[in-house]
Image (cartoon, rainbow, N blue to C red):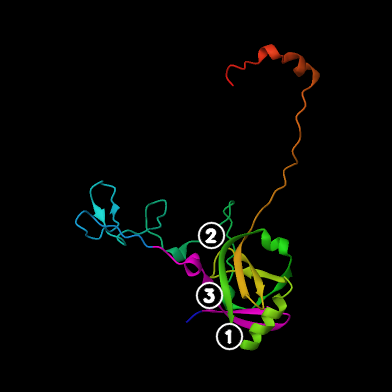
Amino acid sequence: MPKTLVLSLDGREIPVNLIRVTREKLYGSVEIEAFDEKKNPATLKVLAADGKTLIDKGGTGLEVLDEKGQSLDRNDLMPVDLNGDKIDTVESSFSHKNILKKAKMDQYFDLVVKAVYALAPTEEDDEKYLNDHLSGDNVYTFPFAYRDGPMFDTAFIVGGEKEGAFMVTGTEAEVEFLSLKQQGVLDSQEEEDISGDDISFDLM
């Protein structure tokens, strides 16, 4: 059963189901099958470190070890920052209502997209209410965490009456303005040091 996300828009709670939008769903997918010279299907295997042992798919795994080489349970791991201080865990957005705040379109354009979801309100009236608020290029945002973890993503709610409502999640891009192009200028001493005789045109 899909998880239900509760959005709060102007004081009204709107339960929605998330439908992941992928490239495969939009454009379809292509599968490549390989065969040997006898037309037997070829399967992908992993070559072990000894250089001669072949391991079937699913025969390898990842293990977390401490500095002594002892196995660790992932539940015992604790996220820390660069200074070694503990990072507070954020709750999953599915565990509480999420208040939508109006955002600017420029903020949405600065998003580095991680995932796109189609929103399916559980009530028909809620669907109309949400789509009406998204008309006129209105955009809403809220912090989103799919599960409990050290950080959340930024989510934007976009769409309209015709296309429906979508949730786009990701991280905000850090755009840094450097400078405009500036033409370099040689001072008088550099102009005297450089002459036409010093330039070789043979290499051009």
Q: Earlier in the sequence, mark 3 or mark 1?
A: 3
User: Up-down: is 26 above or below 190?
Assistant: below
Amino acid carrying mark 1 in the image: Thr
- 3D distance between C-alphas at marks 2 and 1: 36 Å
Tell which of 180 and 142 is nearer to you.
180
Q: How many marks?
A: 3
Going by the image, does 143 lie left or right of 27? right
* Camera sees residue 135: yes
Q: Residue at x 66, y 53 (%)?
A: 174
Which one is nearer the viewer's eye here, 199 or 95? 199
Q: Is residue 67 left or right of residue 185?
A: left
Residue highlighted by disc 2:
79
Mark 2, secondary structure of its residue: loop
Whole-angstrom CA distance, mark 3 to mark 1, is 13 Å
- Which segment did they paint magenta? 3-30
Q: What's under tag 3, amino acid-wise?
A: Ile
Q: Amino acid at mark 2?
A: Pro
Quadrant of the image occupied by residue 119:
bottom right
| Viewer-nearest of discs 2 and 3 | 3
Q: Residue at x 79, y 21 (%)?
A: 187
Residue that carries the numbered disc 3 in the rendered image? 19
The residue at the far top in this view is: 197
Give x and y (percent) for residue 8: 68, 79
The Cα–Cα distance between marks 2 and 3, rounded to whole angstroms, is 30 Å
